[in-house]
Image (spheres, coloured by chain):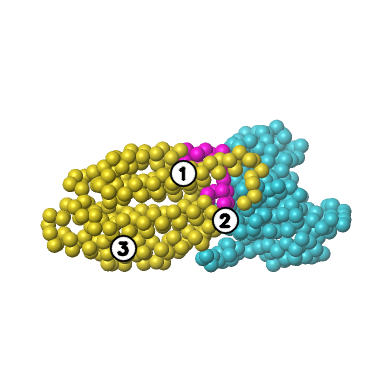
Chain colours: A cyan, B yellow
Amino acid sequence: MNEMPTTVEKVSDMTVTKIAARKVQVYYGDTHAIKDVDIDIQAKAVTAFIGPSGCGKSTFLRTLNRMNDTIDVCRVEGDIKIDGEDIYDPKVDPVQLRAKVGMVFQKPNPFPKSIYDNIAYGPRIHGLASKKADLDEIVASSLQKAGLWNEVKDRLDGPGTGLSGGQQQRLCIARAIAVSPEVILMDEPCSALDPIATAKVEELIDELRENYTIVIVTHSMQQAARVSQQTAFFHLGVLVELGATQDIFTNPQDKRAQDYITGRFG
Amino acid sequence: MTEHTVSSYDEELTTIAGRIAEMGGVAEDLVGDAVSALMRRDLALAEQTIAKDVKLDELLLDIEMRNVQVIARRQPMGQDLREIMAAGRIANDLERVGDMAKNVAKRVIAMDEGLKSSTLAIGVEHMTELALAQLKAVLDAYTRRDAEAAKLVRDRDSEVDAIYTSIFRELLTYMMEDPRNITQCAHLLFCAKNIERIGDHATNIAENVYYMVTGDRLTDDRPRMDETGVADKENV
C-alpha cells in the first residue's frame, strides 16, 4: 500500500481556512443531533455536505450563521470561528452575522415584492446605500453576479414571484449577494429546479467561488461531485469523512461513506 | 461488499465481471493452444486458435457497451466507478493477449517446414508456462478482489522478462551457428516477444486490479530490462 497523504491535509496546504468548527454539538431538547463535529471550511472554495436524510447536515449548516437560534429547544455547544472570530460570542449580532454569512434555501422564497425590492431590501436595512444611485448599482451588480440581469433588467418592477423557479432561485442568490456576504450557505438550492435551471445555478456557484466561500447541502451526489472542491459526509450527526471531492467520490475511506455514495445504504 | 439498494445495478456489475472472467478463460486457452500448436507443429490447432480470437473481440465490444450503459444510467462512484474503469482496461489487455496468441499461431503456419528441432522452442514453452501462470494468477486476483495477490503478479513479471532475455541470446547463438536456422529462429524470437508481451499485459491487469480494490496506484519503481540489457522505466 502506498502511504497517501490524507486528503484533508492535501487540500488545506494550499488554501486558507474561512470557518473553523471544533467539538460542535447541537441538541434539539434531549436529542443529540450533531456530535463532536470538527471541520475546517476553506475560503473561496465550495464545500459540499452530503449524507442521508436526518444525518444532521442541514442542522450543522444552520449553525454556521446561527439560524438555529430561532429554534427555542435548539442548543449549540462548541466552537465555531469565522476568520478566527467566535460567532457564538454574546457580543456578536446575529443579524450582522447573517449578512456576512448569507443563506439560500431549498425552495426559492422571494419576497412578495418587485424584483428590484427583493434585492434592495437587505442593503436598505443594513444601510449599505445612501443614495438611490448607489442602491441601483447594488441591485444591478447583484443581479449580474447571479447571472440574472439580462433576463430581468427590463422588468425590475415586476413581481419576484412572477419569475420561473430557476430564476427565483437565482434571485434569492442575488439577494444574498446584495449585502456583500463572505460566506454563502446553500441548503439543497437545486432540489426544486429542473436540470437546465440546476445547471445555471451550478455554473453560478462555480463563478461565485472566486469571491465567496460556499457551503452547499445537497442530496445529489453528482451535484456535490460537480460543484465542490471539498466534501463532508455526515451520518447520524457525526462527520464521518471529510476530504477533497476528487478523492471522496473515487476512493472513499469509510465504509459508511462508501455505501452511501455508491447507493448501497440499507 | 454490501448490495446496492437497486438490485439491477448489482446484476449489471456482476455481468461485466463475469464477462471479464470469460475473456480471461478464452485468452488463457488461446495462449496455451497457440504454443501447443507451435510445439507439436499442429497446423489445425493453429487455425482454430486464429479463428477463436474473434470471440475475444466480441467480448471486448460487449463489455465496452455495458460499461457505457452503466456510466450513462448509474453514474457509478467510488468502488463501482473503479470497477467499471478497471473492467474496461482489463478487457483491453485481454483482447491484446488474444492478439499475441493469434500472432504465435500465424507464425506456426508461416514456418511451413515446421520446427526442425523442438529443442529450439523449449525456452519459449517454458516462458509460456510462466506467462500463463501470471495470467491465471492475475485473473484469480481479479475474481477474488485480492490487491496483494495482484501486487505479487506484478512483482513476478521480471522472471518472464529474464527468460525472454536468455531466449533472445540463445536464439542469436543458433542463428550464428547456422544461417539456415535464421528464418525459424526469427519466427521463434517473435513468438517469444509475444509471450513476453503477454506477461506485460498480466502486469497491466495486476495494476488495474490493485487500483480497483484499493483506490491507490502501485508506484512504478521496478526497473525493467529488455533484451538490450538496458534498464528501461518507460517501456512497458
Q: Chain of mark 2?
A: A
- Residue under numbered circle 2: A251
| Quadrant of the rendered image containing residue B44 | top left
Give the label, 2 or 1, closer to the camera.
Answer: 1
Kindly indicate whether the residue at mark 3 contacts the one at mark 1 (C-beta within 8 angstroms).
Answer: no
Q: Residue at x 52, y 51 (%)?
A: B143
Q: Residue at x 46, y 44 (%)?
A: B22
- Residue under numbered circle 3: B163
Between the C-alphas of marks 2 and 1, the distance is: 27 Å
Between the C-alphas of marks 2 and 3, the distance is: 38 Å
Mark 2 belongs to which amino acid?
Asn
Judged from the image, the secondary structure of the residue bearing numbered disc 3 is helix
- State the quadrant of the C terminus of chain B: bottom left
Task: Residue B8: give x, y in percent of width and height.
Answer: 61, 38
For residue A44, above or below residue A84: above
Of helix, strand and loop, which mostly describes the magenta segment? Answer: helix
Task: Residue A241: give x, y in percent of width and height.
Answer: 65, 59
As for residue B66 lying within the magenta part, the answer is: yes
Between the C-alphas of marks 1 and 3, the distance is: 29 Å
Part of the protein shown in magenta: B63-83
Judged from the image, the secondary structure of the residue bearing numbered disc 2 is loop
Characterize the local packing of mark 3: few (<14), some (14-19) or many (20 or more) Cα atoms within 10 angstroms: some
Q: Residue B22's mark?
A: 1
